[in-house]
Amino acid sequence: MLNFSKINVFFIYIIVLLISFFSSLNLQNNDNLIIDKKVNLGLDLQGGSYLLLEINSDSLVQEKIQSKVIPIKKLLKDNGLDYSEFKINDKVLIFKILDIDKFDLLFYSKKDNQVNPYIDKYRAFELDHKKKDNNFVEISFSKFGLLTINNAALKQSIEIVRRRIDDVGTKEPTILQRGEKRILVELPGLKDPERIKNLLGKTAQLNFRLVSDNTEFGVDELTSENGETLKISKRIVMSGENLIDAQPSIQNQQNEPTVSFKLDRLGAQKFGRATTDNVGKRLAIVLDGKIISAPNINEPITSGNGMISGNFTFQEATDLALLLRSGALPTPLDVVEERTVGPDLGEDSIKSGITSLVVGFILVILFMFYKYKIFGLVANVALISNLLMLIGILTILEATLTLPGIAGIILTVGMAVDANVLIFERIKEELKTEKSVIHAFDTGYTKAKITVLDANITTLIAAIILFAFGSGPVKGFAITLGIGILTTLFTAYFLARHLTSVIVLKNDKKEIKI
Amino acid sequence: MIKNINFVSKFKKANIFSIIIFILSLFFIAFKGLNYGIDFKGGTLIELRTDKTIKASSIRESLASMNLGDVNVKRFGKDGDYLIKVEQKETNNNNLIPKIKDRLKENLNAEIDFRRVENVGPKVSAELLESSIIAISLALTAMLFYIWVRFEWQFSVGSIIALLHDVVITLGIFSVLSLEINLSIIAAVLTIVGYSMNDTVVIYDRIRENLFKYTKISISDIANLSINETLARTIITSVTTLLALSSIYILGGEILRGFSFAMILGVIIGTYSSIFVASPILKFFKVSYKTLEKEEEKIVP
């Protein structure tokens, strides 16, 4: 175990130096990167917000099942099936039908099924039905139907969330899908998470509807921001989909912040027609079920340009314009988890993390030197290389360093010496019975090898499980702990062993003590 | 360094001690319960800093009228730093944080900086608890399996009992002291599992080696010999690990304090259990070199 070929030695030191070199890249000035690699700081160290958003698809599913009413009724009529007591109940449709078997055949037809399309991807139908007592059937979305709705809503939401966040202009946001219903948003270095939360919390469904008593389409009674209750037609004149741009502006006469918008061609046509036909009436601008304002239509607006006023502050006008530009979310988003760290706490954490690392490191080094003298020095050289290599690998992987991650590094420092301790203690035992010093060292290394491996693999298993199940900062801990074990094994069995062999072989004839 | 301490003679006393502490811990966990943090219970946590010292009670009072449910305020580290924990309300209130901030600024007449805000919904906290329990169970199973592959089943049983001993007692102490259980404590528990296993493996390795070397000696003496032979290493590694951990505990700041405390407990309990729990179990199973040979025959027919 003490014989090294020249080529082996060369490779050991090249690997140590090369990987350690990468750790020095973290000292680079941020503005002037020579090699663009650095350890990323986690949100808990640099400050920022972590948000987990969940789409709330209840209303969307209700809407979608309602849209099935007409096609289903048509299917029943076209095929001469008698039905009665047709009801919409939350997310299900219920009706009574006599010839259930015939309905079954039509409902689950794979060919040209307009009512209940077959989703090839999942090999399942969009809708399902349950037979109830007294010839009632209950129709609802199947598991895969719901999945399709959620998927589409989630994809669209992610896109809109991204647009809204980009529009605010935060640096390097992370926006990722998490599971079937969630979006993970990480915003490093954010000063005011409340504003972003507000922006993401609004679906921003905008529509223009006439103030009217006409019940042809049905009316809603909505309250405006200033407390006025108005009857609003359910018929939507035009919706936010037709907007191509929206900007905050200041209206000159009153110096009042407003939002001016621009419509696409279709929108301009619709808007033009509605305003021409209804001059003198009031047009309500409704956002997420609330009236922003309901101005009088003084003259037809055919240019496709318009303006929304509503007692905004300039900030509110800016945010509304941003929301309208980025489009409406298909469903409301709930913030199900939030973690925000202010930048000064992050700085404090870095300071205390580094301080405890340095102090812990020095304590361990002093103890090892006291315990093993010259071989303690060997272990310490291995320990320093270990630390540099660990940081080097984190840099190469551009891993994210969190506060628990720093704790993982310190813990690695404490536990890394174990490999060398196991070996040295073994050699001590061998020296008692073995006359040849070289032989004793050789057997010591060989015999300790299995134990060192066994002992480290157990910690590695724990680190891997922690990595798989942990979230955020804890994952950072698992990463440093896991990589630390690999660098520990390398430095103990290659670097420290070579250094030991140099000492032992040089002092061949003398007595060596550990 | 090798002394000859008669550990085996102390096995009985130690085992009775362990069993009592273990049962007490289970009792506390079951009846007093664990003090779950917002990660597992849901709710809102705010770490705030003010420009002047105020009483924690006046923070509590000014929030009392907001109808937030159970509110817990305590000092956190330096003067002027406080930690507020608010019980989760059913309603999804997106404006809670700015409302609390405004209220405090108004009532306390002080500059207030929210240094950290964490908000975990009930659904997410239930999931986090579930995945933490799965992670710990999985870690224990993985260890069991690893030892079973590397050694014989008696060793596997011994190490897993030692691990359960460590995990339950660590959590028991957390229960007695009402210390908060959060995600970082789970990370600590998993690391303890790794560390304790590491310690046990070193002694087991030596026991196996000695069983082959001295076939005539009883398992009691083999265990005693092996523990003594590895004692120096056991102590030195514990010392270096504890040195590193104490450094985190004292200097690493308020956020890492719970984590490092759990780890310190775990390292001490884990070291104890490799000697006084894992080894007696081999004696209990009357493990001898024959057990090892039988196993070997099975593998290599």
Image (cartoon, rainbow, N blue to C red):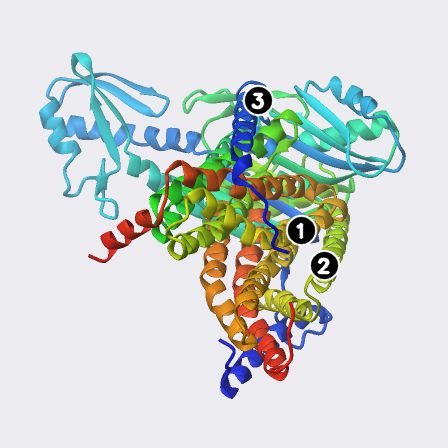
Residue occupying the point 66% across, 21% down:
A227
Residue holding disc 1: B239
User: For mark 1, does the 10 Å Cα neighbourhood hold few (<14), some (14 to 19), or many (20 or more) residues?
Assistant: some
Residue holding disc 2: A367
Q: Nearer the viewer, mark 1 or mark 3?
A: 1
Can residue A267 be seen at all in this image of the molecule? no
- Alpha-carbon span between mark 2 and mark 3: 38 Å
* Tag 3 subunit: B
- Alpha-carbon span between mark 1 and mark 3: 30 Å
- The residue type indicated by label 2 comes to Phe
Q: Are marks 1 and 2 in contact (CB under 8 Å)?
A: yes
Q: Is residue A308 above or below residue A79?
A: below
| Tag of residue A19 | none
Can residue A48 be seen at all in this image of the molecule? yes
- Alpha-carbon span between mark 1 and mark 2: 9 Å
Q: Position of residue B254 (x, y in %)?
A: 73, 41
> Quick one: SS at disc 2?
helix
> Quick one: SS at disc 3?
helix
* Tag 2 subunit: A
User: For mark 3, does the 10 Å Cα neighbourhood hold few (<14), some (14 to 19), or many (20 or more) residues?
Assistant: some
* Tag 1 subunit: B
Q: Position of residue A30 (x, y in %)?
A: 71, 68
Is B10 displayed left or right of A179 in the figure? right
- The residue type indicated by label 1 comes to Val
Q: Is residue B2 above or below residue A75?
A: below
* Outermost residue toward the front in this view: B216
Residue holding disc 3: B28
Q: Are marks 2 and 3 in contact (CB under 8 Å)?
A: no
What is the quadrant of residue B37 in the picture? top right
